[in-house]
Amino acid sequence: MTQHSDWFAPGTRCAVLTAEPIGRPLDYLAPDEGCFLGAFVEVPLGPRKALGVVWGAGDGQFDSAKLRRITRVLEAEPMREELRHFLLRMADYTMTPLPQILRLATRAPGLADPPGMRKVYRLGATLPTRMTDPRERVIAVLRDHGGAGFQLGELAALAGVTTQVVKGLAKAGAVIESDVPRDAPFVRLDPSRPGKHLSPAQDAAATTLRDKAGAFGTVLLKGVTGSGKTEVYLEAVAECLRQGRQALVMLPEIALSAEFLSRVQARFGALPGEWHSGVTQTERRRLWKACGTGEAQMVVGARSSLFLPFRDLGLIVVDEEHDTSYKQEEGVLYNARDMAVLRGSLCGAQVVLASATPSLETWANADSGKYDRVDLAARFGAAELPAMGAIDMRDEQIQSNQWIGSTLMREITARIARGEQSMLFLNRRGYAPVTICRACGHQIGCDHCDARMVEHRFQNRLVCHQCGEEKPILQTCPSCKVEGKLAPVGPGVERLAEEVAQRFPDARLAVLSSDLFASARALKAAIATIADGEADIIIGTQIVAKGHNFPKLTLVGVVDADLGLQGSDLRAAERTFQLLRQVAGRAGRAETKGIALLQSYQPEHPVLRAILAGDEEEFWRAEAAQRKSQAVPPYGRMAGIILSGPDLKPLFDIGETLARQSRPLQQIGAMIFGPAPAPIARVRGRHRVRMLIKAEKAAPLQKALAVWVAQVKLPSNVRLAIDIDPQSFF
Ligand code: ADP
Ligand code: ZN
């Protein structure tokens, strides 16, 4: 497998890339045992040691006599060419220095530690000359079950002897003590086990995926929530495993995926590897290494699982591909969905993008024939899609400081009488989004950001949703010093819960908002009890939109369907459509038909009309036409430039200088907008100024941007970040 040119003989020169901010690989001498291209190594860097990857031949510029030697080669499979290539391409695409990208691929704590070992005891070849009862029992245990060996304590307990007895036997040579790697092996997944019996539609979809397996190609798997997409793509996983390759399934809310894991176990007879922030460091290291050897056949992971060093990745599934959490908005700015397609193209993997409400990017790629498309139209089994209706709030009876109109009140009351569940959806955490002083009109803002403080009555704090800053709830206005005049304005889920408690005093109420739970486990537990029917009314933020099954839920009330429609964001309509569609999909997942009702002051809005009409393709076509006419993504390209620093003026100065020296961008026909204060103009005490670049789809945007920004020298306290394909406009 490994070619001769991939080998660096002891003492030869090779280039090592580290995750340290140096910007390029440095030359070292290969260690005494030599090393392979791609090897994970430890190198001296100044007074420290750093983790690195052998990246290529040295460039020969630095005097050989002064070169330092690679300290050691780590116990891990060398990084394969496919992954090195992927990291390079990703660095180019996202305009991120390579070391920062490498860091994404080496985030396995303890990678540099020698592999953990433990002692095990097995049966030796000879029997002891002096035999006793306890010794007899130890030998019997080893003879009956001792193939792989036991740990000392285990063995002693099984035989009912002290550890001294075992050690005595080891000394006599009747028992052999040896070191084995501490990491337990992964249990094999068995793709030949029978899966669920598929419906004809599922079967057709699975066949299409299977036919395309084994090579790069992207498929949009579109189907309403509950249509059985998961079962279908598990068949693609099965095919991939049959071919002896590895499969990666990426999920947005990985911490909530216990249900998913048990479905994998039911299908393949063993659990997949898990990769996300909730996994212990030891487990992460174990999985990282097992991906490299090929022992881990399937990984279920969050965004960052895309950088695992798979030996032979044959399938990448991106579930809920439209989910905004695939876009990393801090550090390296990248979209894991897009990068999954890139990696698939480099390693010859099939890519499946699954969603009920795909992003317009993916929809357009399928529309143009660049991606294949497979549709699951109906829900699985008896479950039907909920009916949808709008409630025109201009006709509702409602008092001030109430948010549930008379129609929803009636519908909820009827559900409680029938023993069914209702859900009220409001995508706003906390008690009230704004606190205003009734004496002077002052609104409580964050000291560090250009954002309002949100009251969280449950935690008894004011919280900035931008930077996380907290303050106690105030009694006195910080502006006019008048006491007792501060009032909450508008609803958050906590306030909605208060209203429900007052108006339905006998109902059992559950509030689901990410900040109300101390851990993902607590949230998971709450979701499980709701699924068991332990609540009559569920109030939730957008975490309820994601994939939970509540069989008794037959009514979803969207408290404020207009909430997402206003923004200046080019994706406002798309996001509202996706979110409301997903939330509505929560109703009627089992046999009873559900209904989704949207409270709105503008029910004639085109987005709401499209949702209500249930004609999704019409919505996508209209939205696509609109974007096309403005030449914005996916029919044009964009890049965001964010300048941040402690003072505002220098940021504008730099922005204006850049805007004047626009030549490199003009040459590719790109347009520059700004500098302007970013919508959130201050975060954590740093001012933010934003520019937006628009270009044609085929324009070589990254190259032009690189030349353009290189024209200005930045002061050390100013940061310039480039966001290719920006998703949010913070
Ligand atoms: P989606 O991923 O499209 O939301 P799921 O795959 O989660 O849909 O399927 C919805 C529900 O229907 C799940 O509870 C699943 O177990 C069940 N289901 C789907 N397909 C089948 C099948 N072929 N046989 C039995 N149950 C199925
Ligand atoms: Zn803040």
Image (cartoon, rainbow, N blue to C red):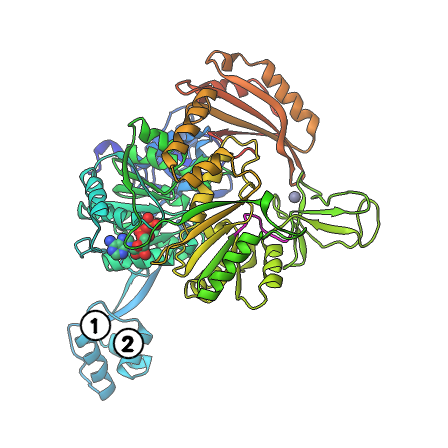
Q: Which of pointers 2 and 1 lies earlier in the amino acid sequence?
A: 1
Residue under the image location 41 percent in, 30 percent down: 65
Q: Position of residue 472 (x, y in %)?
A: 71, 55
Classify mark 1: helix, strand or loop: loop
Q: Which amino acid does label 1 sit on?
A: Gly
Query: Is the Cβ of the residue at disc 2 closer than 8 Å to that at disc 1?
Result: yes
Q: In which quarter of the image is residue 221?
A: top left
Q: Split into 4 quadrants, where in the image is the C terminus?
A: top right
Q: Quadrant of residue 279?
A: bottom left
Could you say which disc has been placed on residue 155 in the image? 2
Q: Which secondary structure is most common in the magenta stretch? A: loop
Classify mark 2: helix, strand or loop: helix
Neighbourhood count class around disc 1 (C-alpha, 10 Å): few under 14, some 14–19, many 20 upward: some
Q: Which amino acid does label 2 sit on?
A: Leu
Residue under the image location 49 percent in, 16 percent down: 670
Residue under the image location 22 percent in, 50 percent down: 199
Give left or right: position of 512 versus 498: left
Q: Residues in magenta?
A: 425-431
Whether 46 is drawn above or below 453: the answer is above
Q: Split into 4 quadrants, where in the image is the N terminus?
A: top left
> In front: 724, or 174?
724
Q: Position of residue 453 (x, y in %)?
A: 67, 47
Neighbourhood count class around disc 2 (C-alpha, 10 Å): few under 14, some 14–19, many 20 upward: many
Alpha carbons under labels 2 and 1: distance apart: 9 Å
To which residue does mark 1 refer? 146
> In front: 529, or 83?
529
Ligand 2 shows up in which quadrant of the image? top right
